[in-house]
């Protein structure tokens, strides 16, 4: 049996909290970004913050999971639309994955976490 220990921090997206994020980066194997798929107006903010994160030296070996949340909402952006809006295909130095999900139903959550587990097993 394989035992995986996960430490999770919900760092919050408010702008005033972002300066404290780097406090938690050391030893991080994976970053999970949760995108509100129905919020087209703020997707560019998330893109900027994601690329700022990826530039930090403590995250250089981290994998990136993007949860495309709220897929249950009518007119939500598809994972393909979010991939384009976040320019995920331009990320060459990190493994990344986008996972459609709904936090309300739990659909897609285990798939995304399983992807992370498969990538970080054995990393120090």
Image (cartoon, rainbow, N blue to C red):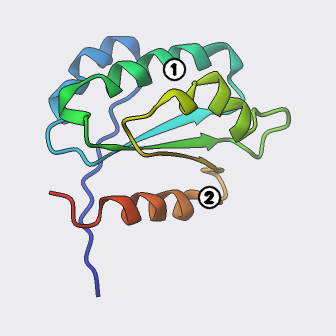
Left or right: residue 61 versus residue 36 is: left
- As helix, strand or loop, the secondary structure at mark 1 comes to helix
Considering only vertical position in the picture, is 43 above or below 115?
Answer: above
Of residues 42 and 82, the one drawn nearer to the viewer in this rendering: 82
Q: Which residue is mark 1?
A: 47
* Residue drawn at (65%, 60%) of the image: 107
Residue ranking furthest to the bottom: 1
Horizontal side of 119 relative to 5 (left or right) equals right
Residue at the image point whose x is 52% and y is 27% from the top: 90
Q: Which residue is mark 2?
A: 108
> Image quadrant of residue 67?
top right
Quarter of image, res 2 = bottom left
99 on left or right of 92: right
Residue 113 in the image: state x and y as whole percent.
46, 59
Q: Position of residue 109 (x, y in %)?
A: 55, 58
Residue located farthest toward the front when viewing the structure as drawn: 92
Which residue is located at x 25 percent, y 25 percent? 21
| Circles 1 and 2: CB atoms closer than 8 Å | no
Residue 82 position within the rendered picture, expressed as x and y whole percent measured from the top left: 66, 31
Residue at image location 84% in from the left, 32% down from the top: 75
């Amino acid at each position: 049996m394989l035992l995986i220990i996960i430490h999770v921090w919900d760092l919050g997206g408010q702008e005033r909290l972002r300066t404290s994020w780097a406090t938690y980066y050391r030893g991080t194997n994976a970053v999970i970004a949760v995108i509100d798929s129905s919020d087209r107006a703020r997707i560019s903010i998330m893109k900027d913050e994601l690329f700022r994160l990826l530039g930090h030296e403590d995250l250089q070996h981290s994998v990136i999971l993007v949860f495309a949340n709220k897929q249950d909402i009518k007119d939500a952006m598809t994972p393909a639309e979010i991939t384009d809006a976040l320019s995920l295909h331009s990320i060459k130095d990190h493994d990344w994955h986008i996972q459609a999900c709904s936090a309300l139903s739990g659909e897609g959550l285990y798939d995304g976490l399983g992807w992370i587990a498969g990538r970080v097993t054995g990393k120090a």
